[in-house]
Image (cartoon, grey):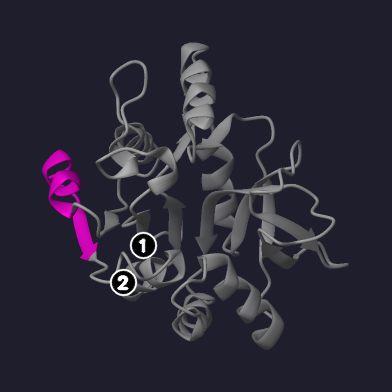
Amino acid sequence: MELSEIVILAAGMGTRLGRPFPKPLTPLADGTSIMKQQVDALKQAFPQAPIVIVVGFKLDLVMESFPDELYVYNELYSETNTSKSLLKGLRAARGGGVLWLNGDVVFDPAVLGPVAERIAAGSSFVCVNTARTADEEVKYTLASDGSVSAISKTVVGGLGEAVGINYVSAADLPVLVARLDECGDGDYFERGLELAIERDGLKVGVLDISDHLVVEVDSPEDLEVANAMRGRGKA
């Protein structure tokens, strides 16, 4: 399996959820935090892959909660978006492929089965849900060969939503790092993918995980959905 590390993006302030601590530490109904359910599932699925957490806002709280993980500090967390946090995480990579995810994603651990299978195939991809295309979420379109042609919150005619779980192969890693470096401070990491697709011909596949429940917790309503999901034993 071509997986050198896992990067969790947890530097942001998470203002939309309105909590006084990093959003990944938000407790779910059973007392487990969003990041705890991530870390537990990832270690079970990929026991050999180190987890690197990109921190910023109130980083001490995250580090105290997960003292055994590795860390990269985005000192400009209040001025930059996920493109720069991912850039820092990928620059710390050891040369293999990298699985990365947003620190606010609650997911059914079973989703990591098809993710692992796709990683073994050795090509870059983003996980998508074709069942919904909400305006405020990251959407995507496909080229004729089935690879991603556009991916952003402003995509028109999106085929589904990117759910915040992604993989870049070792071969594609240098290109993505270069394009993330060119992104503006306010850009999401999807802009780096788009630049690499447009300028370098990067091929990014999609992994349809619509059969698994995955929720990015951006609002109190999302948190309710995540708790209901876990209550049904899906995460």
Specify whether 154 is left or right of 164: right
Residue 5 falls within the magenta-colored stretch: no
Q: In which quarter of the image is residue 6?
A: bottom left
- The residue lying furthest to the right in this view is 144
Q: Circle 2 sits on which residue?
A: 94
**Whole-percent x, y for residue 211 in the image:** 68, 30
- The residue lying furthest to the top in this view is 232
Q: Tell me the kind of residue under disc 1.
A: Ser
Q: Circle 1 sits on which residue?
A: 4
Q: Is residue 220 above or below residue 140?
A: above
Q: In which quarter of the image is residue 19?
A: top left
Provide the residue span drawn in magenta. Answer: 59-72
**Whole-percent x, y for residue 81 in the image:** 43, 66
Q: Residues within 10 Å of mark 1 (few under 14, many from 20)?
A: some
Specify whether 124 is left or right of 50: right
Q: Residue at x 49, y 80 (%)?
A: 184
Comparing 107 with 207, the one in front is 107
Q: What element carries label 2?
A: loop
**Whole-percent x, y for residue 7 in the image:** 36, 57
Q: Residue at x 75, y 65 (%)?
A: 147
Comparing 145 with 188, the one in front is 188
Mark before the other along the chain sequence, 2 or 1: 1
